[in-house]
Image (cartoon, grey):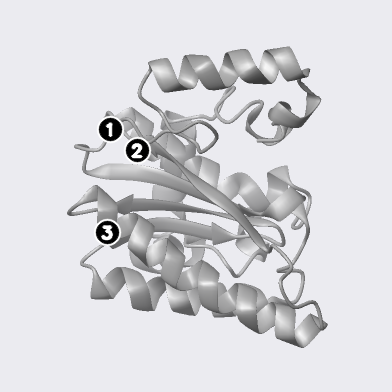
């Protein structure tokens, strides 16, 4: 995400030229797969600041997420909200509806948090990224990635210790054996490696 800042002026110009040749916007992440049913959406706070350190803010994001995805017939299959980013595994009827839903979360939270923190105009969110889910193994590995994310980032010793995650819904609905089998059958390996380095 912040690679661009480390590039020289010549490297930046070449990157923008290449992106435009491919039909992508010059600086925004491309969203090339628009006909898939399932996507992993990731959004982070600008410069990875922990604007969601307070539990109330994580709950606020989840509440708005549920409200605005339901309104647009988006089915959330898995989610996790951490202090500086979140992940959603979602089935979307039309790709554009996902962006609309995320904007309805990001705009109000940015304004409210800036008012609370006395920082009007501060940039709170960075853009979102998406990855099309292409197979059943990809779906379940993504589910495991989302549920393991609090452990990966050191905010909880176990996925079950983080309440801002769908792992509890899966536990209540399908049971611990289901989650254990899912973990055994679809291990993470290198899934997500390097995503946080950009």
Task: Pick whichever of labels 3 and 1 is earlier in the sequence.
Answer: 3
Mark 1 lies on a secondary structure that is helix
User: Which of 147/181 is in front?
Assistant: 147
Percent of width and height locating residue 175:
41, 60
Q: Is residue 196 above or below residue 108?
A: above
Left-right relation of 127 to 177: right
User: Which of 78/127 is in front?
Assistant: 127
Q: What residue is disc 1 on?
A: 136
Mark 3 lies on a secondary structure that is helix
The answer to whether residue 180 is seen in the rendering is no
Categorize mark 1 by other alpha carbons within 10 Å: few (<14), some (14-19), many (20+).
few
Judge depth for marks 3 and 2 and give the one in front: 3
User: Which of 137/21 is in front?
Assistant: 21
Give how far apart the Cα atoms at labels 3 and 2 are.
Answer: 20 Å
Q: What residue is disc 3 on?
A: 97
Q: What residue is disc 2 on?
A: 139
Corner quadrant of residue 182: top left
Asked whether the residues under the numbered discs 1 and 2 touch, taking CB atoms below 8 Å apart as contact, a structural biologist would say: yes
């Amino acid at each position: 995400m912040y690679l661009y800042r480390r590039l020289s002026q010549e490297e930046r110009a070449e990157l923008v030229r290449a992106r435009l040749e491919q039909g992508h916007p010059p600086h925004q992440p491309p969203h090339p797969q628009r006909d898939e049913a399932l996507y992993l959406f990731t959004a982070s706070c600008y410069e990875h600041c922990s604007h969601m350190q307070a539990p109330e803010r994580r709950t606020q994001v989840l509440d708005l997420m549920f409200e605005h995805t339901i309104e647009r017939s988006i089915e959330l299959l898995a989610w996790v909200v951490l202090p500086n980013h979140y992940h959603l595994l979602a089935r979307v009827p039309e790709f554009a509806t996902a962006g609309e839903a995320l904007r309805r979360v990001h705009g109000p939270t940015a304004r409210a948090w800036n008012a609370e923190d006395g920082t009007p105009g501060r940039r709170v969110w960075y853009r979102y990224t998406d990855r099309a889910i292409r197979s059943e193994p990809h779906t379940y590995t993504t589910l495991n990635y989302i549920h393991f994310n609090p452990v990966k980032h050191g905010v909880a010793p176990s996925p079950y210790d983080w309440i801002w995650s769908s792992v509890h819904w899966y536990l209540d609905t399908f049971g611990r054996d289901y989650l254990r089998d899912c973990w055994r059958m679809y291990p993470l390996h290198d899934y997500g490696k390097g995503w946080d380095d950009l």
